[in-house]
Image (cartoon, rainbow, N blue to C red):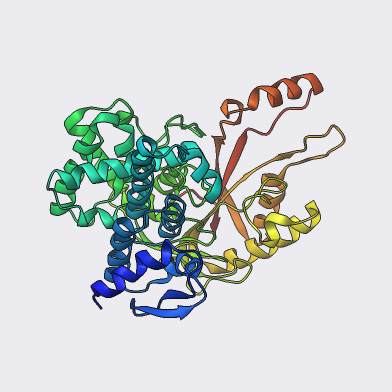
Amino acid sequence: MKLISKTQNKVAELLTNSHTSSQLEISGNGSLQHQKNGAEDLLNQFQNVVDNNSFYETAELIFTEILDPKQLAQCAELACKREPGGAFYRAKLWARVSQIIEARREDDSNQLKLSQVCNQVGVGLTRAKGFVAQGQAIINVEEAGVETTILRKASPLLFQYAQRQRTGAKEYLIEAIKFLETNPEATHTQVHRNWCQKNGSIKANLDIIKPSDWWAFSHPKWRQEEDFPGSIPGEVYANALYYFAPQSGIAVDPMAGSGMLKRVYEDRDLWQKDSNFQLKIELFDLHPRRHFIKKHDAREPLPIKADWIFIDPPYYGQSSHLFTDQLACTDSYDSYLRVMKEIITALAESLNPKGRLCIFLPKWSGFRLEDPNHDIPSDVYSMAIACGLNWIDTAYVSRGRQQEPGSATKNNMAKRDRRMRSDTCVLNVFKKGGNDNV
């Protein structure tokens, strides 16, 4: 349903008057309706537009009509929860915030700063500046007369890649548009690889598949998405698929998070080498974060039989700030193991004969001297064996914790207290039936 000009004018009126007695509600079919309550509810409901075209029209309307930087920033942060189109409009709206602030700086003695807006909406200044750079690149492309509609479906990482090109961001997006017009299903990685092939990149030439059981990734190609900080590097999935998954069948991640397995598999031309993987990817999670992830409790058998399963469970004592489920927030190691036993039992039952289960976990070393060490991979290994699975291989993955920001103090404490930090994850691989590696 098209937005009429009368309604468009009303949006500006409502959102620039915080004391108004009416409000616009975005309904399920994308239309705008009047209600009482004030403009704040419009910001809260902006993300709930069902129809894509109505969402795009509403976002463009907000971009042109709203002049209050805080409200624009609020809309930007609501837009980012939308898929598709969220990353595109978050960037454009933040760029608009910056434009308005810069324009007012010349005329307004108050000199509103971007940092003030960031504080008001709870967004870090560095992140906001990144969105501004991404949005300005989009605006520059549009001002050059290039249609950007196809970028509405783009991943946030595509805009991050553009941002990293600095002065070449505009050219990067124009090249991305050309590539997507001929390859509409291309992923952000494929778009970036096309750019690298034409413009050069050292990191693009790094080999993904490791030749040994020690996996360290200094420059991950698949980075965690900003709205889901719990992801492991996609290279872990790529190597686990390459070495342990069948060429065809059903591959499942029952704790899918942001859907990293799907992203990596879609980019399999980067890592499958001479193989020809034809897997069906199924994703589940207790709290689905994406529309393509189905709701399922991993403590129950899967609704389908799988040939390959990969789980990266919340880590004991290390995940309560990221997740709210029982496994992440358990108050004791015994409770953690009880939940893990339910999960391993359910997944073993969900495997087809000769199916494989990959379990990715670190050991636990407490920060205090009196804290016990827990060999979580070994304890979960015993559970898998008790469920009738057979161990076939192990790989070790660097977590890179010694290089994390702020690690110097922790590293010194570890040496002072003679208590090593846990810096390695263990990938144990099991098979249902038979102890061969075939």
User: Residue 52 at x, y = what percent?
Assistant: 30, 69
User: Residue 373 at x, y = what percent?
Assistant: 78, 38
Q: 144 or 62, which lies in front?
A: 62
Up-down relation of residue 328 to residue 101 (above or below) = below
Residue at (47% x, 68% y) in the render: 39
Q: Quadrant of residue 366?
A: top right
Q: Is residue 45 left or right of residue 85?
A: right
Q: 225 or 240, which lies in front?
A: 225
Q: Quadrant of the N terminus?
A: bottom left
User: Residue 350 at x, y = what percent?
Assistant: 54, 68
Q: 168 or 328, which lies in front?
A: 168
Up-down relation of residue 69 to residue 19 (above or below) = above
Q: 347 or 88, which lies in front?
A: 88
User: Which residue occupies the extreme right position in the image?
Assistant: 370
Q: How many marks?
A: 0
Up-down relation of residue 162 to residue 357 (above or below) = above
Residue at (27% x, 27% y) in the render: 201
User: Residue 390 at x, y = what percent?
Assistant: 59, 54
Q: Is residue 12 left or right of residue 289?
A: left
Q: Is residue 198 left or right of residue 219?
A: left
Q: Can I make out residue 278 in this image?
A: no
Residue at (66% x, 49% y) in the render: 319
Q: Quadrant of residue 340?
A: bottom right
Q: Quadrant of residue 100?
A: top left
Q: Can I make out residue 87 in this image?
A: yes
